[in-house]
Amino acid sequence: MSEQNNLKELISQADLRIRIKEIAKEISLDYHNDSVVFVIVLSGGFIFGSDLIRSVDLECEVDFVKVSSYKGTLPNNDIKLEKDLSINVAGKNVIIVEDIIDTGNTIKYLVKLIESYEPKSLKVATLLLKPDVAIVDCNIDWVGFEIDPEFVVGFGLDYDQKLRNLNAIYKLGGVS
């Protein structure tokens, strides 16, 4: 695969595992006497989400949403809901699990959408945050890693649907 020739490791598999366990511990402590609905954002959030929910020590439900907001490697302001929640989250603690917050448009859209379903609480966990470009007017409660505004792949993140299966996070060179 030619894209793999342009990869430079940014976050190792070991560092990902350590940080995800730390986030899971924080979530478990915050909700130790309660249950949570994890809403995993597809497609990129599925690996982070599955590792996170297997690491928490509490009762939980899992659901998925899917939105499209990228064209190639560039974020797109036109956000389209492709899959909505399947379960009723009214009166429940909800955590949105996102792979990456780039511009912040997708997470703003999802927070507004899920708030309309009247959850008891709503928080956000993201594996990656690009603070130099993200314009976020909602709380990001758990951030795995802050990264520079560059295109990354692996651990669920893709380049044209490829490279999601890599066990670490890589900078993809030669892509704009």
Image (spheres, grey):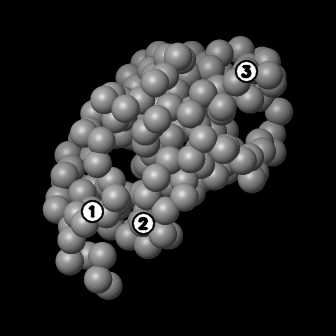
Q: Is 71 left or right of 8, judged from the image as shown?
A: right
Closer to us: 62 or 6? 6
Local crowd at mark 3 within 10 Å, few (<14), some, or many (≥20)? some
Vertical comparison of 58 with 127: above or below: above
Q: Mark 2 points at which residue?
A: 159
How many discs appear?
3
Q: Residue 22's x, y, as percent? A: 30, 31
Mark 1 or mark 2, which has the lower sequence index? 2
Q: Alpha carbon of mark 1 to alpha carbon of mark 2: how far?
A: 9 Å
Q: Alpha carbon of mark 3 to alpha carbon of mark 2: how far?
A: 31 Å
Q: Residue 56's x, y, as percent? A: 45, 35
At mark 3, the secondary structure is: helix
Q: Which residue is drawn at 54% across and 53% down?
A: 70
Callout 1, which amino acid? Leu
Rendered-image quadrant of the C terminus:
bottom left
Q: Badges 1 and 2: C-beta atoms under 8 Å apart?
A: yes
Vertical comparison of 125 with 160: above or below: above
User: Residue 174 sits in which quadrant?
Assistant: bottom left
Local crowd at mark 2 within 10 Å, few (<14), some, or many (≥20)? some
Q: Name the residue under label 3.
A: 115
Q: Residue 132's x, y, as percent? A: 31, 29
Local crowd at mark 1 within 10 Å, few (<14), some, or many (≥20)? many
Callout 2, which amino acid? Tyr
Q: Is 83 left or right of 172, judged from the image as shown?
A: right
Closer to us: 150 or 53? 150
Q: Name the residue under label 1.
A: 172
Vertical comparison of 27 with 171: above or below: above
Q: Which residue is drawn at 49% across and 22% down?
A: 136
Q: Is residue 29 visible?
A: yes
Closer to us: 92 or 83? 83
Callout 3, which amino acid? Glu
Mark 1 or mark 3, which has the lower sequence index? 3
